[in-house]
Amino acid sequence: VAKVTTTDVLIVGAGPVGLFAAFELGLFDMRCHLVDALDRPGGQCTELYADKPIYDVPGWPRILAQDLVDRLMEQIAPFAPGFTFNRMASAIAPRAGGGFRISTDGDDVFDARIVVIAAGGGAFQTFATTGEAPKARSVFHPVRRMEAFRDLTLDDDRIPVDTEKFQTSVAGMFAIGDISFYPGKLRLILCGFHEAALIAQAARRIVAPSERRVFQYTTSSTGLQKKLGVAD
Ligand SMILES: Cc1cc2nc3c(=O)[nH]c(=O)nc-3n(C[C@H](O)[C@H](O)[C@H](O)COP(=O)(O)OP(=O)(O)OC[C@H]3O[C@@H](n4cnc5c(N)ncnc54)[C@H](O)[C@@H]3O)c2cc1C
């Protein structure tokens, strides 16, 4: 029996960029659920170089990759996003009346108004190697072979997006982080963070088209601070 979760935004991939997207979307009052093929958040940072320092995250002269992931988890906690791990998004289909149904390689199914693909270089799958000292080994599933993305225009395994909204060839479906492609794209965490901020603006216009919102800073907006649980 399928287990259906309904959410405003389904984020495919809980790497650093998918995680930060939950923050930006949360500020815009959208409920997020993240699905990842791995058993924990962090994507490449956690899987490939957890104990290595990163030197080009703005404001952090040096931060260990795992520490960055831990801080992102702390930052998004006020919005309490949902997580489903050990599940690969395997199909994304439009729903009558708008939005999408996202199926996985398990029983979990998600109905969402917006889909954000933050799938990095593709899904990781971790296999335990056999032998006397079993060791986890991660492999990438190239995006090209992923059924879920078959309706999207791909460019060398990446998903082309516009640089205003970071929307894909399908309206309501966005792509950010390493998986996205546009002229000048760099596969850097800081670029993914910028892309996350811009999809939040565009996604809100789809979820609430008649709403008028003014741009606000977290430092000076009591409304935003209330959402973060830090208002006096
Ligand atoms: C060794 C190394 C060092 C690096 N150093 C730096 C650095 O110093 N500075 C810097 O800015 N960047 C660095 N990077 C790059 C940086 O790690 C990436 O830019 C960043 O991880 C991209 O984040 P992301 O969230 O887009 O994707 P990822 O981190 O790749 O996360 C994507 C997640 O999506 C999941 N996923 C994919 N498809 C599916 C699916 N169909 N269903 C479910 N889950 C799915 C994957 O399992 C994964 O967890 C480095 C990378 C490596 C490998």
Image (tube, grey):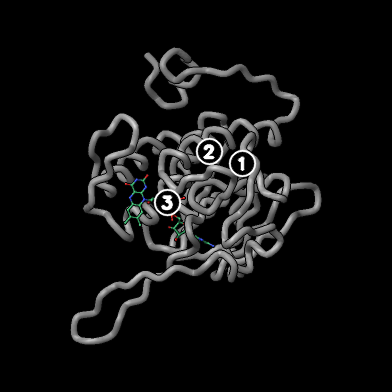
Q: Quadrant of ligand 1?
A: bottom left
Mark 2: which amino acid?
A: Glu
Mark 1: which amino acid?
A: Phe
Q: Position of residue 57 (x, y in %)?
A: 33, 37
Q: Residues within 10 Å of mark 3 (few under 14, many from 20)?
A: many
Q: Position of residue 214 (x, y in %)?
A: 61, 17
Ligand 1 neighbours mark 3 (CB distance < 8 Å): yes
Q: CA distance from mark 1 to mark 2?
A: 7 Å
SS at circle 1: loop
The residue singled out by tag 2 in the image is 195
- Residue name at image x 38 percent, y 62 percent: 39
Q: CA distance from mark 1 to mark 3?
A: 17 Å
In this rendering, is residue 164 above or below 4?
A: above
Taking 56 as reference, is 174 left or right?
right
Question: Which mark is in front, 3 or 2?
Answer: 2
Q: In the displayed image of the protein, which residue is found farthest to the bottom?
A: 131
Where residue 102 sits, quadrant-wise, is bottom right
The residue singled out by tag 1 in the image is 166
Q: CA distance from mark 3 to mark 2?
A: 14 Å
Marks 1 and 3 close (CB-CB < 8 Å): no
Q: Position of residue 168 (x, y in %)?
A: 67, 48
Disc with the residue nearer the chain's start (3 vs 2): 3
Mark 3: which amino acid?
A: Gly
In this rendering, is residue 62 above or below 173?
A: above
The residue singled out by tag 3 in the image is 15
SS at circle 3: loop
Q: Nearer the viewer, residue 50 or 56?
A: 56
Disc with the residue nearer the chain's start (1 vs 2): 1
Q: Nearer the viewer, residue 223 or 63?
A: 63
- Residue name at image x 69 percent, y 45 percent: 172
Ligand 1 neighbours mark 2 (CB distance < 8 Å): no
SS at circle 2: helix
